[in-house]
Image: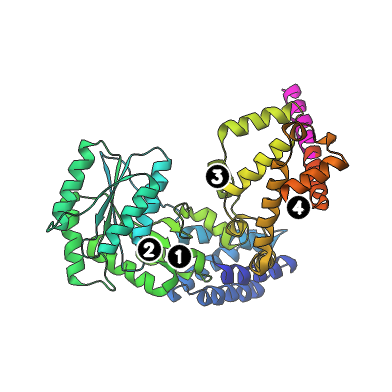
Amino acid sequence: MFDSLSNALGGIFDRLRGAGKLNESNVRDALREVRMALLEADVNFQVARDFIERVTQKCLGEEVLGSITPGQQIVKRVHDELIVLLGSNAQPPDLNGTPAVVMLVGLHGSGKTTSAGKLAAHWKSQGRNVLLVAADIRRPAAVEQLTVLARQAGVEIITPQAGESVPALGARALKAAWDATRDIVIFDTGGRFQIDADLVAELKDLQAAIKARNVLLVVDAAIGQESVHVAEVFHKEVGLTGLILTKLDGDARGGAALSIHAVTGCPIVFTGTGEHQGDLEPFHPERMASRILGMGDVISLVEKAQLAADPEAISNFEKRLKSNRFDLQDFLEQIQQMKKMGPMENLLDLLPMGGRERNQMRSHMASGGADQMKGFVKRNEAIIRSMTPGERRNPDIIKASRRQRIARGSGTTVTDVNDLLRQFDQARKMARQFGRMQKRLQWMR
């Protein structure tokens, strides 16, 4: 996501930071390069021009040019303006009401039905009682697809009856939601390859029947500036309250995300970054701005870790650390917790690193590094599972004969077992240091 823009901006800002003293001339030159990087990333021309004008005004003041670290100050000004560009005052969907009604609209192929399933899974994971409604009555495949997604998310679905109109389906779905005390109802509406009068009329009739507080446009970020035009037309015709940008994982330029809010005024509320139900993220402008500038997104990384983790397991692990106990069973559980966070290549954007380092990591993953890492984790799991409970609790008893038996049982080599035990020993030393630190902090309190 935003790879080309991040790389270009990273190079520009590295030169600024290394320049020491800055003046108006080299600031303007650098920001001209930033403007070209934005345009090459498919950012709307007017949006890029206005953005650079605002940043230039803020960067030519005495407090920046006279600063000890003018290069860093300019990066901060760009970061602040990126947040504004992405929608600093964006609000999440309005889920008040009994039930809260969400209507998804969009063109064919934008990922609307998939997004409906992802939203249902997302809100259900937060303890909400969700109902899906298949309101795309002209495309049987859409009803079948949404039915599968509803089953995967573990939520109920209302499907159209023979000869039923879209408004009648909407009214019936709302009554069912009311009777069953559903929290949220998500309508997956019909789409077209382009916006036409029939589509607009159908959406308006449905809205009149269900009075959705949330009308979210699902738009394919990979189509670039066309996505901005699509959003403008939908907003004019049916009145949007928010946007869901899909396929950001495949859009290296990302200009649509930087243009769409500025042009339409509609907030981006979610982004889709993959095909799985968990590949949907609430949109945070400040976090996205940090990702674009190579600062990473540690908050989102921690949130992913918290979602993947078992609270009881974490509590038990902390107790064991404080009591200076850390064995191979704990080591195995930590490996399994990391696996739940998803593939490493999907976490790269969240790590604070420069564009060059991130590209090197991506290249390594693409050339077999990802498979190597998966194989490494799988091998370590097999080795630990081939140990007895006593060996897991007390790894120090694992001498030569035990290592040979473990290697045979796990289908690995003695060298592999030795490597695992060496890694565990390093992790145990770190755990002991952490445990001692925790005790000191408690004593100081």
Q: How many residues crowd around disc 3 within 10 Å: few (fewer than 14), some, or many (20 or more)? A: few
Q: Nearer the viewer, mark 4 or mark 1?
A: 4
What amino acid type should be assigned to the residue bearing mark 3?
A: Glu
What amino acid type should be assigned to the residue bearing mark 2?
A: Gly
What residue lies at 69% left-to-right and 60% top-to-bottom? 372
Q: What residue is pinned by disc 1?
A: 247
Q: How many residues crowd around disc 4 within 10 Å: few (fewer than 14), some, or many (20 or more)? A: some
**Looking at the image, residue 306 lies above or below residue 281:** above
Query: CA gap, disc 2 to disc 1?
Result: 8 Å
Secondary element at image label 3 = helix
Find the magenta span and give its range. 430-445
For the residues bearing labels 4 and 2, Cβ distance under 8 angstroms:
no
For the residues bearing labels 2 and 3, Cβ distance under 8 angstroms:
no
For the residues bearing labels 1 and 3, Cβ distance under 8 angstroms:
no
- Residue 194 is situated, as x and y percent measured from the top left of the image, at 28, 73
Q: What residue is pinned by disc 2?
A: 111
Specify whether residue 441 is painted magenta.
Answer: yes
What amino acid type should be assigned to the residue bearing mark 4?
A: Thr
Q: Residue furthest left?
A: 163
Tag of residue 412 = 4
What is the chief secondary structure element of the magenta stretch? Answer: helix
Which badge, 4 or 1, is on the more N-terminal residue?
1
Which badge, 1 or 3, is on the more N-terminal residue?
1
- Residue 379 is situated, as x and y percent measured from the top left of the image, at 70, 51
